[in-house]
Image: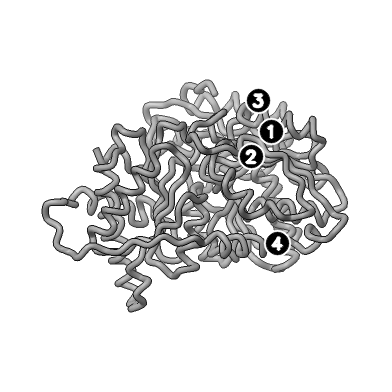
């Protein structure tokens, strides 16, 4: 059963089958073993390095799974600090704020209500993925046996860290937003997820912020719409609210509030790479010459804008594990991913939906133009969006594609990027399905459509969206 719930970056499956309380106990035990072993390797004798932060989202199954997880952690002999029902970036903050060995959030992020899982972080909230510890946790979990416990059970305490978390997030707000006479009107769709808890606790008393709340009730653990802001139809309600309230912008969060998508004052959806390009300029004014990390699928305009703002563009593989590693390696001030994750140097190089929201409204408060005008320079080129193709031999298809364009500059950081100057494409194989994922960019829509048709013949059968 464990093999069915461990994924590339986290643990996730339907509840109660295959993920249930029995597996949650094993996972808790395996997490504790791995995180404490890693803490011991650092040579720290700080007693907090035997503590693990645990939080949960609002799903109906989360309290039971979190309880079983905590029992597994304590049965290994580690101590639990339960921070309650929180957004996932809260866990990253708590690990660093308390100096713990790591943390676990019980969540299935943007998946439907019958899913659940665990996101695991190590010391300093470093991500734990399959190549950075998750495979070891899976092995330790498989060996966990309640009948052979030898350690003295660990302790558990509950901590309310909302005041400290609010202070941390609000350092990213600029004073101009807080001054009398300046206001930002925003529609926020919490997707019946953890933003429905986080936004009121962190942002409700800001006089200059006028919020129209959509889907903030998260008491049932059910969703009015799938809590995935990357699916355009899930933004329909938000876009209508922006139009009817004449808001300056709209924000839609995912289920655990670590990701967001923004729409402008015209209710047009802003690509996350376009948003990264605008925010990068703001962060580079504060930290000139700094690195900005970005998802390699992003528009070429992003790197151009970063260079023009005297920053250093750093391409990263797709996925929060790789983005966070690149953020730390290059001491990047900011980073953005097409998935809606945004990363911050002053947030332990980790991502945060709350801080991304603070950065967006602060940037807009300091601007003299509407959001659509601020984003416009990043919309220089035309993009295909991600298109999936089904193929039985992913490697052969990629080889055929490379041979088809011998004059191109080839980059194999993540899948293959084929760059011919005035247009480029990236094709990445899925980790779990017989799929290739294509992103292509060119000078205009007609050229992009023609090129997609041309390269499609190498990639297999196009999968309907």
Q: Quadrant of the N terminus?
A: top left
Provide the residue designation for mark 4: 283
- Measure the alpha-carbon separation of dots 3 and 1: 33 Å
- Measure the alpha-carbon separation of dots 3 and 2: 33 Å
Q: Position of residue 239 (x, y in %)?
A: 72, 31
Query: Which residue shows up at 46% across the image and 45% down it?
Result: 57
Residue 265 in view (yes/no): yes
Query: Which residue shows up at 61% across the image and 30% down it?
Result: 234
Q: Quadrant of the C terminus?
A: top right
Provide the residue designation for mark 2: 252
Binning the other alpha carbons within 10 Å of mark 3 as few (below 14), some (14 to 19) or many (20 upward) gives few
Which of the two discs, 2 and 4, labels the residue nearer the N terminus? Answer: 2
Q: Position of residue 193 (x, y in %)?
A: 54, 40
Asked if disc 2 and disc 1 are in contact, CB closer than 8 Å, the reply is yes
Which of the two discs, 2 and 1, labels the residue nearer the N terminus? Answer: 1
Provide the residue designation for mark 1: 238
Which of the two discs, 3 and 1, labels the residue nearer the N terminus? Answer: 1
Binning the other alpha carbons within 10 Å of mark 1 as few (below 14), some (14 to 19) or many (20 upward) gives many
Colour treatment of the image: one colour
């Amino acid at each position: 059963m464990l093999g069915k719930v461990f994924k590339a970056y986290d643990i996730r499956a339907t509840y109660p089958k295959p993920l249930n309380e029995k597996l949650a106990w094993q996972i808790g035990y395996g997490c504790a073993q791995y995180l404490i072993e890693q803490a011991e390797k650092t040579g720290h004798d700080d007693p907090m390095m035997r503590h693990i932060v645990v939080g949960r989202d609002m799903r109906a199954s989360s309290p039971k799974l979190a309880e079983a997880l905590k029992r597994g952690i304590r049965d290994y002999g580690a101590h639990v600090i339960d921070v309650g029902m929180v957004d996932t970036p809260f866990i990253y903050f708590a690990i660093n704020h308390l100096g713990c060995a790591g943390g676990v959030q019980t969540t299935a992020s943007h998946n439907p209500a019958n899913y659940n899982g665990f996101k695991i972080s190590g010391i300093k909230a470093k991500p734990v993925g399959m190549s950075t510890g998750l495979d070891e946790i899976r092995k330790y979990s498989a060996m966990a046996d309640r009948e052979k416990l030898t350690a003295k059970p660990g302790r558990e305490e509950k901590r309310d860290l909302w005041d400290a978390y609010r202070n941390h997030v609000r350092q990213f707000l600029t004073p101009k937003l807080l001054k009398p006479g300046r206001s930002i009107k925003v529609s926020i769709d919490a997707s019946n997820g953890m933003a429905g808890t986080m936004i009121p606790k962190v942002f409700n008393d800001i006089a200059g912020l006028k919020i129209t709340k959509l889907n903030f009730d998260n008491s049932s653990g059910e969703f009015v719409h799938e809590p995935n802001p990357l699916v355009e139809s899930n933004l329909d309600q938000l876009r209508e609210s922006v139009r009817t309230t004449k808001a300056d912008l709209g924000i839609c969060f995912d289920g655990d509030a670590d990701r967001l998508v923004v729409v402008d004052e015209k209710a047009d959806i802003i690509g996350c790479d376009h948003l990264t390009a605008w925010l990068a300029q703001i962060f580079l004014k504060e930290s000139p010459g700094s690195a900005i990390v970005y998802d390699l699928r992003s528009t070429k305009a992003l790197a151009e804008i970063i260079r023009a703002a005297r920053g250093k563009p750093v391409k990263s593989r797709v996925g929060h594990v790789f983005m966070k590693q690149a953020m730390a390696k290059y001491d990047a001030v900011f980073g953005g991913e097409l998935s809606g994750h945004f990363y911050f140097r002053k947030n332990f190089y980790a991502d945060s939906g709350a801080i991304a929201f603070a950065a967006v409204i602060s940037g807009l408060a300091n601007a003299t133009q509407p959001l659509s005008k601020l984003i416009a320079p990043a919309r220089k080129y035309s993009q295909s969006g991600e298109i999936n193709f089904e193929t039985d031999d992913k490697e052969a298809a990629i080889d055929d594609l490379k041979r088809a364009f011998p004059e191109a500059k080839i980059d194999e950081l993540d899948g293959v990027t084929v760059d011919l100057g005035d247009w480029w494409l990236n094709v990445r194989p899925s980790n779990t399905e017989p799929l290739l994922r294509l992103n292509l960019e060119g000078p205009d829509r007609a050229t992009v459509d023609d090129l997609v048709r041309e390269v499609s013949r190498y990639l297999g059968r196009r999968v309907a969206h």
